[in-house]
Amino acid sequence: MTARLITTRGPSSPDGLVLVLHGGASRKDHPAVSPTQLSVLRMVPIAHRLARAGRGRLAVVRLLNSVRGWDTRHTPVEDVRWALEQLRPEYDGLPTCLVGHSLGGRAALLAGDQPEVSSVVALNPWVHRTDRVDLTGRPVLVVHGTEDRVADPGRSVAITKELAGTTIAGYLNVTGGQHSMLRHRSVFEGAATDFVRATLLGADVTGPVADLLDGAGVVTV
């Protein structure tokens, strides 16, 4: 099975590239990723919102992983690296942001050290205590709901604090937010969009993302 790329927006002369990464638990009986599985579909409106906000300046591409879940023999991190290699001929040299949800958030963080990557957004990331990555100089935004029962917010806090030692790393604490991001979806989607616009396009943004980029560390909404 091979990973796939789906282009949401591909302007002729973009100023930045966004690679959108989905989550989704493993299934023994259906290891392949389906374009219609809920974890994949959840990232479609985020990709479209990023494309609209980019106003023709952002290329937005979604990655469908080669297998469901986190297969240790071939992890989503390797799929991200594959995707960046595939995109390099067309978008070589463009600042790139990885935007991922759940295990896609983990993949975004762990693949964020690739040379193309300028910034990372992790939404309710499913991270391990042992996860380590050097993202020096690459701004990072972690957004996590307080009512997430799938991915531990405490682990997100810990990795954000560790990353803050070498880069701008902000943690947006979404009161009442759940793992699916359906509740308070505008907060999750809006934060990701503002962060991408600020880090890839140099746009002036306001609100919690602006505070985090200014070094607030943790903001609760």
Image (spheres, rainbow, N blue to C red):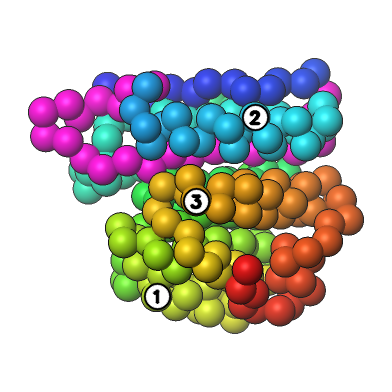
Question: Residue 85: where, in percent of width, then height?
Answer: 53, 32
Q: Which residues are magenta?
A: 13-35
Mark-to-mark CA distance, 2 and 3:
19 Å
Would you call the spot at circle 2 few (<14 residues within 10 Å), some (14-19), or many (20 or more)? Answer: some
Q: Which of the two discs, 2 and 3, sits closer to the camera?
A: 3
Q: Which residue is mark 1?
A: 154
- Which residue corresponds to mark 3? 183
Toward the right, the furthest residue is 204
Toward the left, the furthest residue is 29
Mark 2 or mark 1: name the one nearer the start of the chain: 2
The residue sitting at 46% across, 36% down in the picture is 42
Quadrant (top left/top right/bottom left/bottom right) for the C terminus = bottom right
Name the kind of residue labelled 2 in the image.
His
Instruction: Work out whether 101 lies above or below 11.
Output: below
Pointer 2 or 3: first along the chain: 2
Check disc 3 and give the amino acid type: Arg
Q: Is residue 37 left or right of residue 184?
A: left
Dot 2: what SS?
A: helix
Q: Give how far apart the Cα atoms at labels 2 and 1 are.
A: 30 Å
**Quarter of the rendering occupied by the N terminus:** top left
Count of numbered tags: 3
